[in-house]
Image: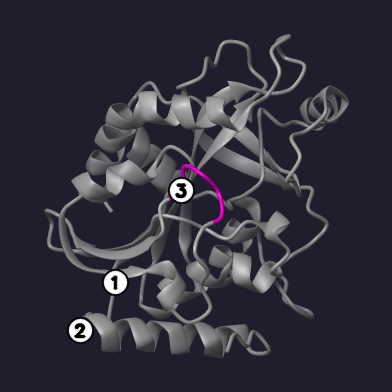
Amino acid sequence: MIDFSDPAAYAAHAAAAIAESTGVSAADFALVLGSGWNAAADTLGETIASLPLGDVPGFAAPVVAGHGGELRLVRVATGKVAVILTGRTHYYEGRGVAQVVHGVRTAAALGATDIVLTNGCGGLNPAWAPGTTVLIADHINLTGDTPLRGATFIDMTDAYSPALRDLARRVDPDLPEGVYCQFRGPQYETPAEVRMAGAIGADLVGMSTGLECIAARAEGMRVLGISLVTNAAAGVTAAPLDHAEVIAAGKAAQPRLAALLRGLVVEL
């Protein structure tokens, strides 16, 4: 039975269940692989154990095409252990914000101190063609929600770690940076909403990541956010938006995404 009345306790319960099922009781860092990114999981190191997400307390199987459905524990070349989620719960699924960030909290309960949050998104910059990978420098949360409760005041000045962004640029010096804007979804943004997002400082629009970042910062984790531009945002071009386009762009970018993550995991 899912019980988020005490999210921290439930994350600890999920971490204990993972340890009991896999024999692995601790992880050093975590990755959440969004649209287009999950194939990279096969290339990051030795898979120690794998569990269907739906079998882990508090998790649900992904409902979005293009997402995987596993929790993997992977030993990378440095000997560190990564917990990799090849799917996520999105806010628009209506399961509540606590379940959206449960993966982040469970990774923290396993001991992960760094987390890499990836996504597929729409781009506002015409120079960023589909397939462009962009570091998230900051975010705008337009969901109207938060995973925090009560007087939980978290400093979000450097929500996305400058040190981890510098590390990513050591792996790929050509990575641009941008501001990610999380909408509620599931409908794509209208051209007017995209113009609004641009007016308030956004370069990227999507339906994930921001709430997870807040939860990770509350857990004391360093966050690295990376977006794959899968399509131009509504109104940037005359083309209509289609989720099949998102999947196709992700597949085309898989070799480059895998190379980037392979370089990252040996530096974390």
Percent position (x, y) of residue 82?
28, 62
Instruction: Quadrant for the N terminus, please.
Output: bottom right
Q: Is residue 43 left or right of residue 215?
A: left
| Tag 2 residue | 23
At numbered mark 1, what does the secondary structure look like: helix, strand or loop? loop
Work out whether 115 lies above or below 104. above
Q: Amino acid at mark 3?
A: His
Q: Amino acid at mark 1?
A: Ala
- Of mark 3 and mark 1, the one earlier in the sequence is 1
At numbered mark 2, what does the secondary structure look like: helix, strand or loop? loop
Q: Nearer the viewer, residue 4 or 60?
A: 60
Percent position (x, y) of residue 182?
70, 45
| Tag 3 residue | 67
Real-space Cα distance between discs 1 and 2? 12 Å
- Of mark 2 and mark 3, the one earlier in the sequence is 2
- Residue at 61% x, 83% y is 7
Q: Is residue 71 left or right of residue 226?
A: left
Percent position (x, y) of residue 142?
79, 48
Percent position (x, y) of residue 25?
26, 83
Point out the frontmost of discs 3 and 1.
3
| Tag 1 residue | 27
- Residue at 46% x, 71% y is 54
Q: Is residue 182 left or right of residue 244?
A: right
Q: Is residue 157 visible?
A: no
Point out the frontmost of discs 2 and 3.
3
Q: Which residues are magenta?
A: 63-67
- Residue at 30% x, 42% y is 261
Real-space Cα distance between discs 3 and 1? 22 Å
At numbered mark 3, what does the secondary structure look like: helix, strand or loop? loop
- Residue at 84% x, 31% y is 193
